[in-house]
Structure formats: structure tokens, C-alpha cells
Image (cartoon, helix red, strand yellow):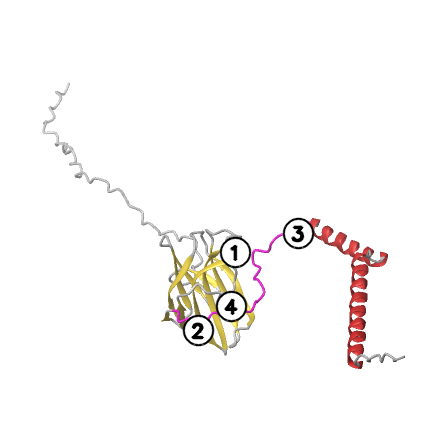
Amino acid sequence: MHRHRTRGRPLWLLFAALAAALVLGILGLGLAKGVVRSDSPLPPEKQEIEERIERERLEALARPQPPKNPNYIPPFTPGPQPSPCSDDNSPCVPAGAGTIVETQQARYSPMVFSFQNHWFEVKDGQYVVVFAGREGSAGDPSQGVVVVEVDTMDFMPVAGGGIYRTPIKDGAVRIVGADGERLTLTSASGATFIFDVASRTFVSPSGPAPTPLAPTPTPVAPTLTPVPTSPAPTPTPVPTPLASTLTPVPRPSP
């Protein structure tokens, strides 16, 4: 009888089959764990924490909000900054102690302020920037405003700024000129305002309004009514008594 010789399979093929089976087993186990994990409910302690956070959020939304501060200036947010006529090629006009920049670019939202232009000067190693315009859509658009900012040379705000509203509501104002640190602003209807940057106040065109004094009465000289002059009365002549011219008659003697 002839023995049938069995030819052996290559060993690399057996190792490849074993490796493939091992990889498939690991993947299947991971998928099974993921399914179980995603379908399993949260632990009670974690679910309680999430419910507490949601309750606190709803309570905060229902809580009454404090009234808005009309003088609130939003915090600085990085973004386009007012430039001294170099970044956006805005028209610049020398005016007084500084320069007028014809641009509406600013770091504020249009809901807070809407500006027409601004003026700036370099003073004591800082930028003093004055924006002119009106309140935004969240405020009163008929109210003109001037916003003063004091920035470092790298445009970081420091103390010294503020919000200043025009004495009358006449819409947005624009800076049209300056004399030193006194800015001339006009509204669309032609009203003129003078803002003094040094004192941060609106002033009259010739300076601060003087304190009215009590009127001083002007003395009036009395007027005399002339009395008509009449001629002196002519005296009535008095008759001079005449001496008696009668000669006495002698009486006869008895």
C-alpha cells in the first residue's frame, strides 16, 4: 500500500488567519461595550447633579434683572481700534490741538452708540479720543452723545473717559472743528454745541455761561414841572390926604 503524503500548509498563512481573528474579536468587543455604555442610564449621583444645574439655570432666568445703568460703558473687546489716520485710510483734518478722523469705526456695538466721526490728540503720552454721534438702537436715537476715551499708546483704555449727552435732543452730532481742546459739533438740523475736552462739559460758544447778576436799578433824576411865571401885580395908588384949606371963622363976642 502506498502512503498518501499530506502536504503541510504554509505557517505564515496560519499566523495571518489568527491575527485577523484576534483583531476582529477586539473590534467586536469594543463595539459591544460602546453600545452598552451609550444605552445605559446615568448613575444616580450624576443625574442629580445635572438636574440641579438645570434648576439653577431656570431660576436665574426667572430672577428679575437689575435696571440698566445709562452711564454704563461696555468693557473693552479686542477688535478694530480708532486709528490715528493710518489703518483704514480715513480722511483726517487737523483741528485745534488734535485731528478729526472721518470714520464711524469704533469698538462699540450699534445697539449702544452710533458715531459720525471722532477727534483725538496725544496728551501726556496717551491718546484722548472723543467720539461724536447718538445713542444706539437700544437707547434713544434722538439723544446726541459725546464719548471720551483715554487710551494708552497701544489703545488699551485707562481711567478718565465718560459719556456726555447733548443739552438738547437733536439727533446725532458731528465734530466739524476745534479751537484748542474746544470742539464744535453740529446736528443734522443745524444746532451747534461746544464741548470742552479739558473740563468734559458742554459750554456756550464764548465760554462758560456767566452767573446772572441781580439787575441794578438806574437812578432817575426827578423832573420838576415848571410853574408859569406871572407878571408882578401893579400896586394900587393910595391917595395922599390934603391939608385943610378952610379958614376958621371967628365967633362974635357976646
In the image, which disc is placed on residue 111? 1
Counting residues from the start of the chain, the first of labels 1 and 3 encountered is 3
Side of 179 relative to 250 (left or right): right
Instruction: Give the label, 3 or 4, closer to the camera.
Output: 3
Residues under labels 2 and 1: Cα distance?
Answer: 25 Å
Instruction: Give the label, 1 or 3, closer to the camera.
Output: 1
Tell me the SS state at disc 1: loop
Residues under labels 3 and 2: Cα distance?
Answer: 40 Å
Look at the numbered discs 3 and 2 and tell me whether their residues touch, using CB distance below 8 Å. Answer: no
- State which region is magenta: 64-90
Residue 16 lies in the magenta stretch: no
Could you tell me the amino acid type at mark 4? Glu
Instruction: Give the label, 2 or 1, closer to the camera.
Output: 2
Percent across and percent down for residue 42 are 82, 57
Q: Which residue is mark 3?
A: 65
Side of 251 relative to 87 (left or right): left
Could you tell me the amino acid type at mark 1? Met
Q: Which residue is mark 4?
A: 149
